[in-house]
Image (cartoon, grey):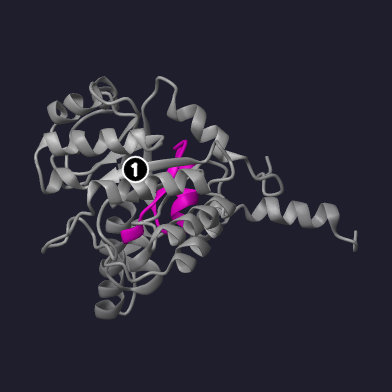
Amino acid sequence: MKCDIANPTKTAGQFRLMLYDDKTYYAPGVAECIGALAAQKAGFQMISITGNGVSASMLGMPDMGLMTMTEVTDNIRRITESVRIPVIADADTGYGEILNIMRTVRSMENAGAAAIHIEDQRFPKRCAYYEGAQTLADTEEHVMRIRAAVAARTNPDFSIIARTDAFLHYDMDEVFRRVDRYISAGADAVFVVGFTDLEQIFHVSEKIEAPLIINVNDKGPLNRFSKEEMQQAGVKIVFYPSTQRSIMVRMLCRAMDCLNQNGNTLAMLDNIADLDELNSLVCVQSYQEYEDEYSSHN
């Protein structure tokens, strides 16, 4: 069967339907096209683009607000063109003030994202898990960001997700206060960072009037619960933002150390894909069949 390279799927509507059905979905974090294709091949029904991973892979720099909106949007476009499943993009704080946020929404929507999430840190933001203070925006400031984002979209199926880092700094009451205001502002879903157990998650999900998105760090306390347990706790989407990035970092460093020390990679062969695996992932056969079918030389 050919890869459907000629007919990209309208994924915003597809994502919207999934957002309001009764299932729980997992969205692994990706930073580039091979990671996106690997997730699709594994059977995931959506993926998320991790800003942390993109900053590291594109720039070799930390996630501290150093990427421009244009750089991020170009990467979104490459990824959305490589897969047929919905892509959720990380829009940081929107890359500026209200007019910048509105341009960000239009640009990322046009780049093929099915949804974006905008966080309530101050601009320029930094990774929520870095040491040092991350300053949250005032609630009303982020409310206006969400309102502007909703107003800017041209496709009503394009989803605006409000992210809050409040649980990393404040108590649950502040999380509820912010989440309620963001939903009232028009957010289609909320992404709450900082949960450490299922009881906290359930406490939030049963009280809010929008789909709940959470993130799980591979070496964190939530990475022991099953999909069924996440669904029972009321989670709509589970992000695993760091899995691909962390595996890549470790395996690349090990492989480079092996090659440098031994002058060969024999000790790493079990972890090295052959050319057929790569060719299958990027649909070499399908491209060749399209070329043969439509070439003027035939």
Q: Residues within 10 Å of mark 1 (few under 14, many from 20)?
A: many
Magenta region, residue range: 30-52
Seen at 47% across and 68% down, the residue is 71
Name the quadrant of the C terminus. bottom right
Q: Position of residue 153 (x, y in %)?
A: 53, 46
Query: Helix or strand or loop: what does disc 1 sit on?
Result: strand
- Up/down of 244 relative to 166, above or below: below
Looking at the image, residue 58 sits to the left or right of residue 76; the answer is left
Q: Position of residue 128 (x, y in %)?
A: 20, 55
Q: Name the foreground residue: 209 vs 151.
A: 151
- Up/down of 173 relative to 267, above or below: above
Seen at 23% across and 39% down, the residue is 178
- Where residue 167 sits, quadrant-wise, is top left
Residue under label 1, please give it.
162
- Where residue 193 sits, quadrant-wise, is top left
Seen at 37% across and 45% down, the residue is 28
Q: Looking at the image, can residue 33 be seen?
A: no
Q: Position of residue 98 (x, y in %)?
A: 41, 57
Q: Amino acid at mark 1?
A: Ala
Q: Position of residue 20 (x, y in %)?
A: 44, 25
Looking at the image, residue 62 sits to the left or right of residue 29; the answer is left
Q: Looking at the image, can residue 67 be seen?
A: yes
The magenta stretch spans residue 63: no
- Where residue 287 sits, quadrant-wise, is bottom right
Q: Name the foreground residue: 140 vs 21.
A: 140
- Up/down of 285 relative to 175, above or below: below
Name the quadrant of the N terminus. top right
The magenta stretch spans residue 50: yes
